[in-house]
Amino acid sequence: NRNYAKHGDRHTDYPFRHSPGEWADYQCFRFDTYHRLTLPFRIADVVSVVPRAGFRATYWNDSGYENLSGRGRAGSTHDDVTRTIVEGGITFAARGTADFAESWQHMVEPYADVLAQEAKYHGLAHGTRPYVFDSIDASRDWLDQFAGRSRNLPYSWYGVTPGLRNAFRKADDKGRMRTVFDFDAYAAVQLNRTTWTNGNRYHRLARRADHPNYGDKDGIVVPGFRARWLPDDDTALMARFEYDTENDTVAYADVAWRQVLTKAFKYELGLVRRDHRWWDFSSAPFDSEVQKNEDFNVARFTCIDASFEHELCDAIAWGPFIRWDCREAELDEIGSWIAQRTDCLGFRFSVSYDNCSESLD
């Protein structure tokens, strides 16, 4: 199953799951290694510069044939496959501050991040595709596709992300500056291009399976905004939005209210909206007549959720959670979890009731 990415501390799985059926059964060994070097420095004590270079290599000991009919199993090629990702980038930022109204301070930070990343599969024969491990090889959220900034994307990405951060801070009783409100306005500009197969944009495929590249012919500009309001040390209101300029829709929206009631109790309320396609999840079979209205690789929902956490002791905590699907006007999921925490590891057991799932086999 392909579970949606978690956000923040809310212990919920967003409602997108795809079980491709018997044709996708496979057994495969995967090995992955990732390395990155950075060399931060400052220019004239004003501009912060962080160049970086990275390399990722992934090995699978098997691969499969394409199966776009959806009948029978895809079949194993018994051929191993490797993927290499070469990454280079640099971040520029300059920060300035100004004091006002005795105890307040305004911080402004313009920045720009440049990312160039090239991904390539080796060992794929014609008509074959790698056995992608959904939970670690593929993007699961809109931010995975367009946020840039070296998010370890599993495909090629060329672009720049300019932005402007602002923060308003206030001195507390002990004279320490504490952020009360901050916001970041930015735009991810993706420059790489791709040739696609014909057909509906939700079902078309990148023509070259050995070159995981999901850009557009004219490039993509994704404006975004995120903000936090922190009235005290125990309360936070957070919001983030990103806009899909190609389809004229809010592709990503997340608003959350988090409050610590006591040392042992805290809760969180949230609103989540998704309206976008996963570009690298596009090769599942479909019937153009029966499923012509089914967008199996599109996240399109609006949900509200609530969660509560009770820390029984330093090592053990538990909490219930619930999520309501606003689009369908029904309960989407309800459950609870219990976790054991150590200084370096955590173990969690959860049980939930998922109200609805759909198979497109």
Image (cartoon, rainbow, N blue to C red):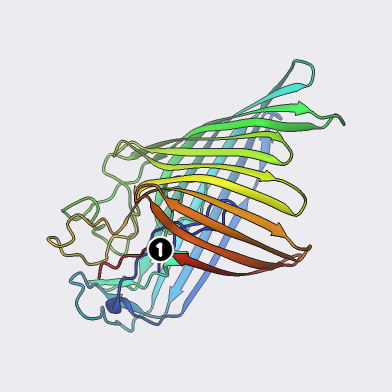
Image-based side of 222 in relation to 196, left or right: right
Identify the residue at image location x=44%, y=63%. Answer: 3
Q: Is residue 148 above or below residue 101?
A: below
Identify the residue at image location x=35%, y=54%. Answer: 278
- Pick the residue in front: 267 or 278: 267
Give the image location of residue 311, x and y in percent. Answer: 73, 59
Q: Is residue 266 above or below residue 114?
A: below
Give the image location of residue 176, x and y in percent. Answer: 82, 32
Picture quadrant where residue 24 is located? bottom left
Quarter of the C terminus within the rendering: bottom left
Residue extending furthest top?
A: 101
Image-based side of 107 in relation to 188, left or right: right
Picture quadrant where residue 283 is located? bottom left
Label total for image: 1
Give the image location of residue 285, x and y in percent. Answer: 22, 67
The residue carrying mark 1 is 355
- Pick the residue in front: 14 or 144: 14
Mark 1 closeness class: few <14, some 14–19, many ≥20 residues within 10 Å:
few
